[in-house]
Image (tube, coloured by chain):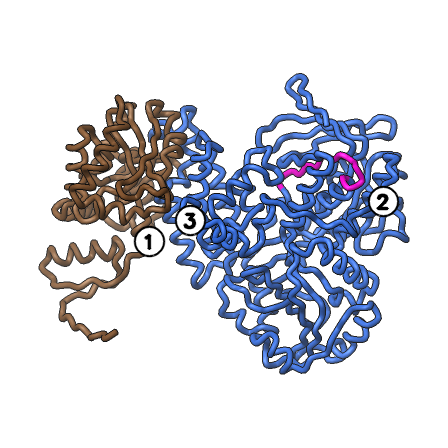
Chain colours: A brown, B blue
Amino acid sequence: MNRQTRRYKVQLAVIGSGLAGFAASVFALERGIHCAQVGNTGAIAYTTGYFDLLGSHQHRLLNDPWAGLDRLLSSEPDHPLSRIAKAEIRTAFDRFTQTLTEMGISYTRAGDRNLFALTPAGTLKPTLSVPMTMQSGIAARERGAKVLIADFWGLQGFSANEFVANGKASWPQLSATRLAFPDMESGAQVFPEVMARALEVPVNRERLAERLSAVLGDAESIGMPAIMGIHKPDHVHAELERLVGVPLF
Amino acid sequence: MNTQETNGVETFETDVLIIGGGVTGTGVMRDLALRGIHCLLIDRRDLNAGASGGNHGLLHSGGRYASQDAETAAECRQEGDILRRIAAECIDDCGGLFVAVEGDDPEFAEAFSGHCKAAGIQCTSLSPMEAREREPMLSERVFAAYAVTDATIDPFRITLGNVNHAQQLTRSLFLPHTEVERFEIENGVISSAWCRDMRTGARRRILARQVVNAAGAWAMQVAQLAGCSEVRLLYSKGTLIISNTRIGQGVINHLRRPGDGDILVPGGTVSLLGTTSDNIESLDDIRPTVAEVERVLNEGRAMVPCLEKTRFIRAFSGVRPLLLASGSGADGRAVSRGFTLFDHQDQGLENFATVTGGKLTTFRLMAEKTGDLVARRLGNTQPCRTATESLPSGDAIRWTEPGFAPRDWYKRNDPQDMILCECEMVPQSAIDSIVESAPGAEQQMTLQAIGVRSRVGKGSCQGSFCSIRVTSHLYDRGVYDSSQGLLHMRDFLSARFKGVQPVLWGEQMPQMELSEALHCSLMGLDQLESQSDAPDGIGDPEST
């Protein structure tokens, strides 16, 4: 292979493409600093996509992360979060989620309280900001809505049965179903990246929506593994919801 | 066997109650079953939870003991020959070397072949160059080398095979997580053993005609429950470390008086370096430490310098039960110095025996001597058959062998049979067969129990990914229908981390960072307890 050296002349090079690197680039660009970011996708592919501030302090879950920061300051004055003013944290959160929203990946705005967001295992995780695509799941749990959790033949790492088994104690109206993803019906292993890309194409969304509608019954909402689009998740999510007619998360 | 339940206490009846699910206890179980005797085996944890699971997996040629203990050396040679015949599938006959490096005592090295000869052990002198042709990573400072017939043995497969065979022969039974709390003794006879299920807290009563104490390092505590004070043990903790890949073709022993880190043993796709030897007071919370790992490494690299740059994925510790004084009631001629069989006759007990000490290599002989005593006491005249009768294999007990799972998966050629553990390539079908019919399957098969019965979690990711996939699969199979599956997964990962923590440097460090991201940030396992504390499961979190 013929590799050519490519040269970029920028004011700032950001090394690393995790959240910190990405945030550094965003804030630099906002200030008009011309920058280039290098790195490869690492553990970020294995994260929830939720933005935490402070979920627990000394093994106690926190409803109010801002009050938790005061306690952190007294118990661990050297903690990185103890060195930043609250107002600065809030501004940074807002600017970062705003940028993502403008890119077509909408986030909820950081509030005064932690959200108790859903994990793939059906447990809850205290966090401050979640993708809009997950918000209807949090709301459905809070009101104990009748919800169907769907997983897919051949997809590893997400089991609707596991989600329901862990969630049902406080959310009895949960049930599980397993679907075949369009054109991935053989039962052999399927991969979430491929499914997410497939849903960028309208015809695949229509076929999946048909299958979701067929199993919906009287459920008010459907939860799925994180496969709703990869380039335009907000758009894919909105289109699927429109086709199925109920909120999806 | 009869099982009945009265007043909420489950009662079991059996010919022989065996306490301790290591190689010795399961060896006694199979020995007796081959004589037609029904056994009930219990362990406070699971199979091989003690020293039987915390060792090199070395089938000694006897060379190690040739210089100081000719009797034990000869015993190792004889037992090694027997095990190669009856349990060939459990053995990798890889051979071994004894090497001396500059700084070692030349006279000790010089005398080695003579000592081997005296004990009847095969030993071939090699030039340093020949030794390095066999094992290229040996130090260039090797000045003496001998080839011996060391081999490796899979103690997990031995144990699973023993229990499996005993189940087939006499419908003998294994109960994991069952601890003896007290014995009821009437007129010199243990009439019943009162036990507790360590997981549910339920009481169990076991009525047995004979009771065998094969509890390894815990044998002293069990003997004391029966009022027997003559079993006096010294606890010797040994720590070993596991490399990411196999380092040598065969076993490499340091040719000197036994010390830390002087044996490097291949184990399928990895190698094990050990061990330390430190006397400890208590059996609680046995875990490897950073200091022990450093000691093992410092010594090991004198023989094999590349150990300095090797990626280690885990450390583990076992406790050797060493006898402080020989027992009074045992048959001193029949029993070698390596282990002791107490018949407890002089403590006034007619139906209790303790077997302890010994080595993995000689477990079969320990079981034979114990079986002889117990059979005689039961009036059973059948001879021991374990020296000639092959250990049968079975569908559910072959998964501890490195490389077996991918071979089997490839042959099945079933696209729906997905790989759950990618490091060791363990597919769904393997997990299914273990959950259905591996020894202990009558009880709930946890992730930890599956780990003991397969290669799941043994690879370089140390359970980061496979724990999630296997747990999901168990939920899908209906093994779990509550948060217990996640709690078991967390227990499994905590147990793994105990071994990973002292080797966290270099490449293993980012691996564990990833693991933390997956298990804590993504799955929320670190918050599990605070959530499950609430009476309604995940319920609303504690308000602040």
In front here: A173 or B403?
A: B403
Is residue A30 shown left or right of residue B505?
A: left
Callout 2: chain: B
Percent from the top left, x then y, of residue B299? Answer: 61, 69
Residue A2, compared with residue A23, is above or below; it is below
Which label was assigned to residue A43?
A: 1
* Residue B37 counted in the magenta span: yes
**For residue A20, what is the image quadrant?**
bottom left
In front here: A225 or B394?
A: B394
Query: Badge 2: how crowded within 10 Å, few (<14), some, or many (20+)?
Result: some
Q: Give the range drawn in magenta.
A: B33-46
Q: Does any portion of residue A205 appear in the rendered image?
A: yes
**For residue A236, what is the image quadrant?**
top left
Q: How far apart are marks 3 and 2 (CA)?
A: 49 Å
Residue B464, compared with residue B260, is above or below; it is above
Q: Quadrant of the N terminus of chain A?
A: bottom left
Residue B173, compared with residue A196, is above or below; it is above
Callout 3: chain: B
In front here: B389 or B279?
A: B389
Q: Which marked residue is nearer to the observer: mark 1 or mark 3?
A: 3
Which label was assigned to residue B465?
A: 3
Is residue A179 shown left or right of residue B168?
A: left
Percent from the top left, x then y, of residue B466? Answer: 44, 47
Helix, strand or loop at mark 3: loop
Kind of residue at badge 2 = Pro
Write the residue at 73% across / 35% down.
B170
| Callout 1 and callout 2 share a chain | no
Write the residue at 31% across / 32% down.
A149
Helix, strand or loop at mark 2: loop
Magenta-highlighted stretch: main secondary structure? loop
